[in-house]
Amino acid sequence: MKNLEDIIDFANLVFNLKGEGIDFAELLPKAYSHDRAERLKHHIIEENGKIRALIDLYPLELRQSDCRLKAAYVGTVSVHPNSRHKGYMTELMKQAEESARAVQCDLMILDGGRHRYRHYGFERAGIKYNYNITRDSIRHCCQSLYGDDFGAETFYSFEIMDRQTEDADDIIDRLYALYSRRHVTARSREDFLPCLQSWGGIIYLVYHNENLVGYINASFDERNIFEFELDDIYMLPEIIYEFIDNIDCDETGITVGADETEKMGFLDKMCDYYNVGMSHQIKILNYRNVLEFLFKWKSKYRRLEQGECTIVINETGAGYQVTVSDAGAAQEIKVETACTVPDIIVENSSELVYLLTTPLCFREQQNPQGKLKNIPNGWFPLPFFLPEADAF
């Protein structure tokens, strides 16, 4: 097996042929720093002792309070230009899936061209909202929320966070506690800082009267906010207004998942416009576990109508009955293997992901002949979204 330096050198070579100026050791410290690289699973094809194709797998565990989902994130997909059209990528994708199944992963995740990876059984999942916020749009929002005298004083300050920051461990504990309030998390406390520093991320600590009240994870050019968590969401418009002023930026973009409904209520007031997109691409390996996880995720932010439906996947011949019932304030969700008459029939993982988690579900629900016409109200779309810090 090639050492880490050889692997990084090869990845840098292939990606920099596109003129992107990438250094993977700097770009992804959560995966390619020497103290973390052992968690990666490398898949390599060599010619005459030299790497000619590479895929790395990054392990990821998605967590809810009562549910876990084991994932393998596919990344650094690269083939040397002189070795293309030899079937190397098909072979490595096959090896990567075999590795994921061998350690009982429930799904695989990747990013990149949709049509390229549909060939390997992946499909874009979930819904994300991208908000464009300008200095002017947020000023009007803040005036309506806080009064016409808004802006007369500055209430918040921002400090860039790194390992050298004073009391760094205590601060990370505080930030991680805020992060852990999300419906689904995918980082350990140990990984929290290097994850936020990956993909060129900068961590801004948000202070109010010298008290730490949250954090903002922004891109290196500060034009996009990848993630934020605050003590009180009502502070969001004022904080973003002062943050834009602090970094001297006329506009910024903020992306959130469909489950972040409380944040979306304020972002809608703050933005000039927003657009809706799909999230990462996934391939389901364990249908029962993934369906249960996604339905429980949905129930965290929307109460589902009681009922049941059976989903059959033609590719495997397996059927799964999903049952939603009320259990007091909470809801009980069960996914069990079933042989009953199906309510939904899909061909494979790609069709299930596209049909049940993306905006396609709205068309199918409204179509009298659609596959989802008789499904209980509010079940779909199922959520799937990870912040940039969790991507690989």
Image: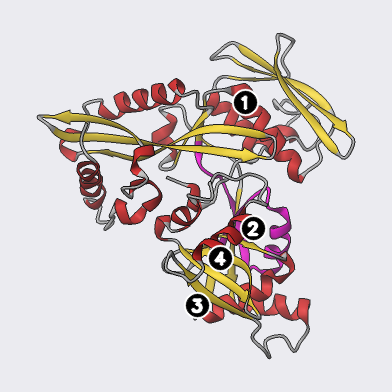
What residue is pinned by disc 2?
178
Image quarter in which the C terminus is found? top left
Please tell me how crowded label 3 is: few (under 14), some (14-19), or many (20+) other residues with Cα within 10 Å: some
Q: Which residue shows up at 74% across the image and 89% down it?
A: 149
Disc 4 residue type (three-letter)? Ile
Residue 102 rendering spot, x and y as whole percentages: 43, 20
Tag 1 secondary structure: helix
Disc 2 residue type (three-letter)? Leu
Q: Which residue shows up at 49% across the image and 52% down it?
A: 388
Q: Is residue 385 left or right of residue 39?
A: right
What residue is pinned by disc 4?
216
* Quarter of the rendering containing residue 354: top right
| Residue 249, numbered label | 3
Tag 3 secondary structure: loop
Mark 1 → mark 2, Cα distance in angstroms: 27 Å
| Residue 289, numbered label | 1
Tag 2 secondary structure: helix
Answer whether labels 3 and 4 touch (C-beta < 8 Å).
no
Q: Nearer the viewer, mark 3 or mark 4?
A: 4
Q: Nearer the viewer, residue 75 or 315?
A: 75
Q: Is residue 67 left or right of residue 17?
A: right
Q: Nearer the viewer, residue 149 or 350?
A: 149
Residue segment shown in magenta: 254-281
The tag earlier along the polypeptide, 1 or 2, is 2
Please tell me how crowded label 2 is: few (under 14), some (14-19), or many (20+) other residues with Cα within 10 Å: some
Answer whether labels 3 and 2 touch (C-beta < 8 Å).
no
